[in-house]
Image (cartoon, rainbow, N blue to C red):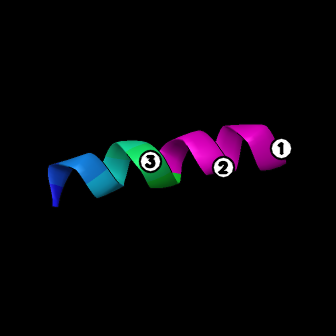
Amino acid sequence: MQNEDHSFEAVFVLAS
């Protein structure tokens, strides 16, 4: 579940 946290966070930065 730790890997997902990093992946989902990267999407937020790209979306922003």
Q: Are dots 1 and 2 in contact, CB under 8 Å?
A: yes
Q: Are dots 1 and 3 in contact, CB under 8 Å?
A: no
Q: Secondary structure at mark 1?
A: loop
Q: Secondary structure at mark 2?
A: helix
Residue 7's label in the rendered image is: 3
Q: Considering the image in quadrants, where does the N terminus appear? A: bottom left
Q: Please give the name of the residue rendered at 24% of the width and 47% of the height, measured from the top-left corner.
A: 3
Residue type highlighted by circle 3: Ser
What residue does disc 1 label? 16
What residue does disc 2 label? 12
Judged left or right of residue 2, residue 15 is right
Expressed as whole percent of the image width and height from the top left, the position of residue 7 reads: 44, 47
Residue type highlighted by circle 1: Ser
- Examine the rendered structure and indicate whether residue 13 appears above or below residue 8: above
Q: Residues within 10 Å of mark 1 (few under 14, many from 20)?
A: few
Judged left or right of residue 3, residue 14 is right
Number of the front mark, 2 or 3: 3
| Residue 14 found in image quarter | top right
Marks 2 and 3 sit apart, C-alpha to C-alpha, by: 9 Å
Expressed as whole percent of the image width and height from the top left, the position of residue 16 reads: 83, 43
Marks 1 and 2 sit apart, C-alpha to C-alpha, by: 6 Å
The span shown in magenta is 9-16
Q: Residues within 10 Å of mark 2 (few under 14, many from 20)?
A: few
